[in-house]
Amino acid sequence: MDFNNTQTIWMQIVDWVFEQILTAAWKPGDKAKSVRELAVMFEVNPNTVMRSYDYLQNKEIILNKRGIGFFVTEDAVEKIKNLRKKQFMEEEVPVFIKNMRLLDIDIQEIVEMAKGN
């Protein structure tokens, strides 16, 4: 994975896990990769991966079964969509609306574009 400078590495790992779950590469009930596996895969310190997994546990996306590993929760997809929707509405939509106003873009132009016309 190529890390970018606009977001912390641990949060980029969280986003990667989100994508694994949303694309069904990791399904509810599946065992997630271990902290060590991800640390080796991403060439990062295991503590960085653990910080990602702590966040994911706090958001109830994964759960830790002591001695066995981390598992994707049954409602992980719904929780991720809710988190991403909230983030999108709070961070990206206001910028989008501001740009629409600055550029005099009518909402109908956006609707037509979304329809593919």
Image (tube, rainbow, N blue to C red):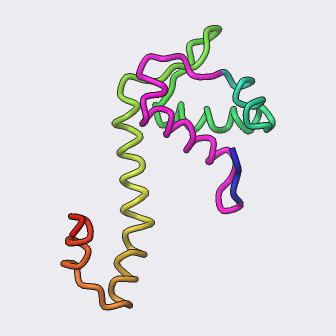
Tell me the quarter of the image containing the N terminus. Answer: top right
Position of residue 76 in the picture relative to residue 113 (left or right): right
Task: Using the image, determine if residue 91 lies above or below residue 99.
Answer: above
Q: Position of residue 98 (x, y in %)?
A: 38, 82
Residue drawn at point x = 38 percent, y = 90 percent = 102
Residue drawn at point x = 23 percent, y = 79 percent = 109
Q: Nearer the viewer, residue 117 or 52?
A: 117
Task: Using the image, determine if residue 90 lies above or below residue 86.
Answer: below
Q: Is residue 31 magenta?
A: yes
Task: Using the image, determine if residue 66 lies above or below residue 47.
Answer: above
| Residue segment shown in magenta | 5-33
Q: Position of residue 61 (x, y in %)?
A: 47, 31
Residue drawn at point x = 52 percent, y = 35 percent = 58
Q: Tell me where residue 113 sits by quadrant.
A: bottom left
Q: Tell me where residue 54 sits by quadrant.
A: top right
Q: Position of residue 64 (x, y in %)?
A: 56, 19
Task: Using the image, determine if residue 87 lies above or below residue 20.
Answer: below
Q: How many marks?
A: 0
In the image, farthest residue toward the front: 117
Q: Is residue 112 magenta?
A: no
